[in-house]
Image (cartoon, rainbow, N blue to C red):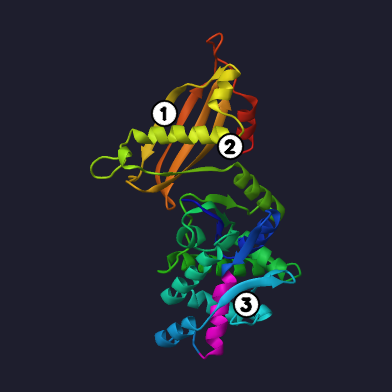
Amino acid sequence: MAVNAIAIDGPAASGKSSAAQMLAEAIPGAIHINTGSMYRAAAWKALRLGIDPKNPDPAKLDNMLANTSMRFIPGADGLELEVDGSVPGDALRSSEISAGASAIAAEPAVRAKLVEWQRKMADGALVVMEGRDIGTVVFPDAKYKFFLTASPEARAKRRLLQDGGTPSEEEIAKVAAEIAARDKADSTRAVGPLRQAEDAVLLDNSGMNLQETIDFMLRKIKNKVVLSYRVPYADTDQMGVVYYANYFEYFERFRNELLRETGHTYLELEKEGIAMPVIEANCRYKASARYDDVLDITGCFAEASGVRVKIVCQIFCRGKLLVEGFTVHACVDMKTGRPARPPRFIKELVEAQ
């Protein structure tokens, strides 16, 4: 079942942290959890204990994790990370700590413990959490997932502008090369590699400012509809695998929910004299759904042209795409039996995608 969380992943300097903080501020009741600061805190404490983050002694590292507590508390500029009762603050932002964080994040023991803490932080609240494996490892069932990226050059320029001054082309090229190398290391590491979740919305914000990025994300969140459905035994064969024809029934269940979320139902459309029979259905199978799986079914109105409406649909289980497809509907005037134009609200939803 979808977890009430917003997962934002992406490479270094893609604007994840700024976007996550601003997005949380724009959504009533949401809190921002900066997972990067947690890994920096782990490196900070390791160095204070004489543990090398790049080559830690396993026993010392396990002991450190067993005797560490982290939580986010209200601060002057939003939530601050408290480690063992104290707030490291700016001490976490040094280049030494950043390098140590990248190294210690690759340690399986550290990754496992911090993921455990991060999941607990989502209990009872809508969290906006950013990192490199939030949508794939921490919250594979997150209701909303985004993958932010930008060209190495755009990210390099942003990073240099944060330091003040006007960067030269040579400086941008140098930092861009460093960022590209970091991308490769992050995406190929054995533990928690950087990768886009199958159900994440990809946003290349190379040519966008922060406000444009936030507006895009808010629009996607507002328009997204997710129907959770637990597979009953009646839907499966004796092997516990869902009958292929049932996916079309799942598409129909979702279409009902999609219409309800817009404030309409099939019955209301029929009262207005509009019928929307299916004239084409397409379903592509990637993996099987099984008995007792909790499926997250999502999609949208994709097209509305002439007299036709196209609805796309995807079915996921724990973030893995199982089935995708679409249905095409003809809009028909029920009184005359002749083709009719799609309802205005559907056209508006298509335009808002």
Q: For mark 2, what is the residue?
A: 261
Nearer to the camera, 251 or 311: 251
Q: Which mark is residue 281?
A: 1
Distance from Cα at disc 3 to Cα at disc 1: 53 Å
What percent of the width, then of the height, locates residue 250?
A: 42, 36
Say whether residue 135 is left or right of residue 208: left
What percent of the width, then of the height, locates residue 261?
A: 58, 37
Rendered view: 5 above or below 307 = below
Q: Secondary structure at mark 1?
A: strand
Q: Residue furthest bottom?
A: 50
Q: Secondary structure at mark 2?
A: helix
Distance from Cα at disc 2 to Cα at disc 1: 22 Å
Residue range in magenta is 36-50
Q: Which mark is residue 209?
A: none
Quadrant location, the C terminus = top right
What percent of the width, then of the height, locates residue 11?
A: 55, 62
Residue ID at (65%, 80%): 87
Q: Secondary structure at mark 3?
A: strand
Q: Earlier in the sequence, mark 3 or mark 1?
A: 3
